[in-house]
Image: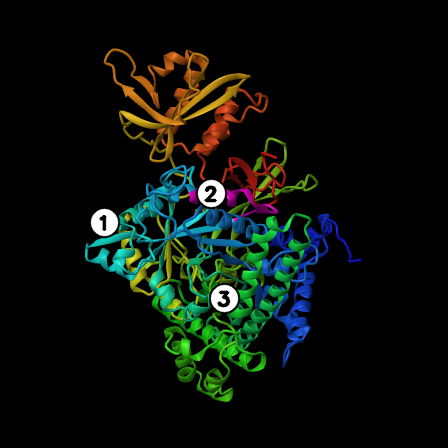
């Protein structure tokens, strides 16, 4: 019987482990500490977790020649300092309490143009999401809207309805509060590409998925030349007679539409598909099932019907004398880094064995379930497919984190030529060590089963790495006779490398005196953040910054990015403006240098790199268009831009005095001119047991005005849920507003409702919305009266407006359970990302 720990014991011990870092402590305790089926803690600190992981990896190592010992592996994991398994391996490896996969990312078969195939894909999505996996689905095979089908519908509804299906499925499935992760992709040649590009401008659509477009070289050439571009279906057609539907558009028209959507909301992303396939070692094996057809939700893993596991090297741990000048000058230990990268690739291969064991357990469990076989068939066959791919390819996802901090620790400023040169050297070293390790393992353990030297002898990525080994690592390559071994024994893994976002994992990563590094290849986002600490009533001398409605006292304090704090500690005699972090945060770096850096790193990654190009709010559409083309020319496989303010929920910055950067004075926001006709949504609701209707006018995909009242005098039973509000200007009195829903016309809607008190409130709400007040703040004000009945007009209108809050947007309030300001809107509810509280449960 294992030792069980109380939550209080775990939190206290973990806080001590992380040296008082509450955020790191909370992340590990809430997400990764092992619990039994009753939710009792089995692990007290990360030491217990690392011991669990080391024991399991050592068990696999013992199967092969020259095994690493449990202590050696434990030392590599210990303290999150050298090698860090990502979330799914940390949660799954050695976990006998839950049957889950070690895989972080999966891509399923692209659904065929048939309802049965689409439904099967939907089921596969469910089965993977509930095993803690992110999923990618490509929908290029689905025929465009309006084409004839041989069923009762006569014509197809197009891609939109199926995007919604997959999105809704993802929203339904969560694991311990973890949102399901889904990406939907499509070929740029698909005739419904415009639907795909614009669908997420409607804030109510496809809220459970990210979307990206597979862009070809031919499309980019057509954009640059302002040429026509042919759309056709099936997108796989090779000959003109195979195209059942086709039309011609201006390539730049589509490109500008993509840019505008990204400028508005950060989506869709762009995947440079020809480059992905051209540079992929796995695509040399398309004839045996490894043709890449989609990516994982963060885009760093282009995959066939396959899965991948993730593991990181913490790059800042290899910097000697970080942040220092003088006699003990900072330098990067490339030899130590390469040695550990070789070991990390061995552990990645061990993780393939551990995953195969997990898949066997999943398959056995499903087979033993009491349901008839026909209900279990799809899930069983899905895991058998994934297991086959894992066995035949042994795909791995070895990556880096803390690259931004590593650059700064060496005295370089992120987004400069010197920093970029180092980043390329770092990634080249990773690639050479990883592939050298994979070649050595092929001799000791055997190559991946479908390896064929002739199939991959012309692959540009493999040849680039082998050339680098010969030219830059002559002694190493000669010592181990790597080139000859490659020709004789092959490689152990079909593809090895990636760079994932690793957001929560980077919060745990060791950095000199503390924890919390930059994430993946990213720069630091903010150097200073404002946090709050609850004051113990016994602490009579504490400074009280504010008192909440419960009477609890809180102290505000500034938290520095840990790397920046380390620099300040090492350079107390210097001005902060001389810091390599100064002017190098995500929104400050030169975007051209940022794109160039990603391209230089991408040359040495066989999968892809997840990185977001952050740009200021003032960035224009023309500048984003320029970024996309620069990304293509720089050899990137995928590119994501986030314009500050285009989506809510970013970190809060502070000014030099530690005060949130609000305007120094009230800024008057002028309302945009109202069109004569405005689209609207109709919501039927209950207020105090009576039937009411709420009409919400929409402008630029956001609520702009509200009209609400009793519906007893209106027969709306056959009315559609959407319509329009028409403004009838009058010279002598206030303008009249008519509502049209389907064939029903309601003239002078305010007069029809005849509820003056509520009409006044609707005018105030409309005024707030028209002048740009974020919907979440309107909702919060409507919910202030705790004594108001749940079916009161105020609470009902608040629930209607919640439908228009962007999924994942921060609410701005603190959690009533854990008191942290980590509430977000999820499916219309206030939910806490720290403790899992939900206002709707």
Q: Is residue 807 above or below residue 110?
A: above
Residue 296, how many percent across, how many down? 47, 57
Q: Is residue 822 visible?
A: no
Q: Is residue 120 above or below residue 345?
A: above
- Residue 175 on the magenta span: yes
Q: Is residue 764 left or right of residue 42?
A: left
Residue 135, how many percent across, how many down? 50, 54
> Closer to the camera, 614 or 406?
614
Q: Disc 1 designates what residue?
A: 249
Q: Is residue 380 above or below residue 417?
A: above
Q: Which mark is residue 442?
A: none
Label 3: state its secondary structure.
strand
Q: Which numbered disc, 1 or 3, marks the residue that appears first in the sequence? A: 1
Q: Which residues are magenta?
A: 162-180
Q: Which numbered disc, 2 or 1, marks the residue that appears first in the sequence? A: 2
User: Residue 556's image quarter?
Assistant: top right
Q: Which mark is residue 399?
A: 3
Q: Which numbered disc, 2 or 3, marks the residue that appears first in the sequence? A: 2
Residue 748, how many percent across, how many down? 33, 14
> Closer to the camera, 632 or 377?
377
* Front of the two marks 1 and 3: 1
Q: Is residue 45 left or right of residue 286?
A: right
Q: Which residue sits at x=40%, y=49%? A: 113
Label 2: state its secondary structure.
helix
Label 1: state its secondary structure.
strand
């Amino acid at each position: 019987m294992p030792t069980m720990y109380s939550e209080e014991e775990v939190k206290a011990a973990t806080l001590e482990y992380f040296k008082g870092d509450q955020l790191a402590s909370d992340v590990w305790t809430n997400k990764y500490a092992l619990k039994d089926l009753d939710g009792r803690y089995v692990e007290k600190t990360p030491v217990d977790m690392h011991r669990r992981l080391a024991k399991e990896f050592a068990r696999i190592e013992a199967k092969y020649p020259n095994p690493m010992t449990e202590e050696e592996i434990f030392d590599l994991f210990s303290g999150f300092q050298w090698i860090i398994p990502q979330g799914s391996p940390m949660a799954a490896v050695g976990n006998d309490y839950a049957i889950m996969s070690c895989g972080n990312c999966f891509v399923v078969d692209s659904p065929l143009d048939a309802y049965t195939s689409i439904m099967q894909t939907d089921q596969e999505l469910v089965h993977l999401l509930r095993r803690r996996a992110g999923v990618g689905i490509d929908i290029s095979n689905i025929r465009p809207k309006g084409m004839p089908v041989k069923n009762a519908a006569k014509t197809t509804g197009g891609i939109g309805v199926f995007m919604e299906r997959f999105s809704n499925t993802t929203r339904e499935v969560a694991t311990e509060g973890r949102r399901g992760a889904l990406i939907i992709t499509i070929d740029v040649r698909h005739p419904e590409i415009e639907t795909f590009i614009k669908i997420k401008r409607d804030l109510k659509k496809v809220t459970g998925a990210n979307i990206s477009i597979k862009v070809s070289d031919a499309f980019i050439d057509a954009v640059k030349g302002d040429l026509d571009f042919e759309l056709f279906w099936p997108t796989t057609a090779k000959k003109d007679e195979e195209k059942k539907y086709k039309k011609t558009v201006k390539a730049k028209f589509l490109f500008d539409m993509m840019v505008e959507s990204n400028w508005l909301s950060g989506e869709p992303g762009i995947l440079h598909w020809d480059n992905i396939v051209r540079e992929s070692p796995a695509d040399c094996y398309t004839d045996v099932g490894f043709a890449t057809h989609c990516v994982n939700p963060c885009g760093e893993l282009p995959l066939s019907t396959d899965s991948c596991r993730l593991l990181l090297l913490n790059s800042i741990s290899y910097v000697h004398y970080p942040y220092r000048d003088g006699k003990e000058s900072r330098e990067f230990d490339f030899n130590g880094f390469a040695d550990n990268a070789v070991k990390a690739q061995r552990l990645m291969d061990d993780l393939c064995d551990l995953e195969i064991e997990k898949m066997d357990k999943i398959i056995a469990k499903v087979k033993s379930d009491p349901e008839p076989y026909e209900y279990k068939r799809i899930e069983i066959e899905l895991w058998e497919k994934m297991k086959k791919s894992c066995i035949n390819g042994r795909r791995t996802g070895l990556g880096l984190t803390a690259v931004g901090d590593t650059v700064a620790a060496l005295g370089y400023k992120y987004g400069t030529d010197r920093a970029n040169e180092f980043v390329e050297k770092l990634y080249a070293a990773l690639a050479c060590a990883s592939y050298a390790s994979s070649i050595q393992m092929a001799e000791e353990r055997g190559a991946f089963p479908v390896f064929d030297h002739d199939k991959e002898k012309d692959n540009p990525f493999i040849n680039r790495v082998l050339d680098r080994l010969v030219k830059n690592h002559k002694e190493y390559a000669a010592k181990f006779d790597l080139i000859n071994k490659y020709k004789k024994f092959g490689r152990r893994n079909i593809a090895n490398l990636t760079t994932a976002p690793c957001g929560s994992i980077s919060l745990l990563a060791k950095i000199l005196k503390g924890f919390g590094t930059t994430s993946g290849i990213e720069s630091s986002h903010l150097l200073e953040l404002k946090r709050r600490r609850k004051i113990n009533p016994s602490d009579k001398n504490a400074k009280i910054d504010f008192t909440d409605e419960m009477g609890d006292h809180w102290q505000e304090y500034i938290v520095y990015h840990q790397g920046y704090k380390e620099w300040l500690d090492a350079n107390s005699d210097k001005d902060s403006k001389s810091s390599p972090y100064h002017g190098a945060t995500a929104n400050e770096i030169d975007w051209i240098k940022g794109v160039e850096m990603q391209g230089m790193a991408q040359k040495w990654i066989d999968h892809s790199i997840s990185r977001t190009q952050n740009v200021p709010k003032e960035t224009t559409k023309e500048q984003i268009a320029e970024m996309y083309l620069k990304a293509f020319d720089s050899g990137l496989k995928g590119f994501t831009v986030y314009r500050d303010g285009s989506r809510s929920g970013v970190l809060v910055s502070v000014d030099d005095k530690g005060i949130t950067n609000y305007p120094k004075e009230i800024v008057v926001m002028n309302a945009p001119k109202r069109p004569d006709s405005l689209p609207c949504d109709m919501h039927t609701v209950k207020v105090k047991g009576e039937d009411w209707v709420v009409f919400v006018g929409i402008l630029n995909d956001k609520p702009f005005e509200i009209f609400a009242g009793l519906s007893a005098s209106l027969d709306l039973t056959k009315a559609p849920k959407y319509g329009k509000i028409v403004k009838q200007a009058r010279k002598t009195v206030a303008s009249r507003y008519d509502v049209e829903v389907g064939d029903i016309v309601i003239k002078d809607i305010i007069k029809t409702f005849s509820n003056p008190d509520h009409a006044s409130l609707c005018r105030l709400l409309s005024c707030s919305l028209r002048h740009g007040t974020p919907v979440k703040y309107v909702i919060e004000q409507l919910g202030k009266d705790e004594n108001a009945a749940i079916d009161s007009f105020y609470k009902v209108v608040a629930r209607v407006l919640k439908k228009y809050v962007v999924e994942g947007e921060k609410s701005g309030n603190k959690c009533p359970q854990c008191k942290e300001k980590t509430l977000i809107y999820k499916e219309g509810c206030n939910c806490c990302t720290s403790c899992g509280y939900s206002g709707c449960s």
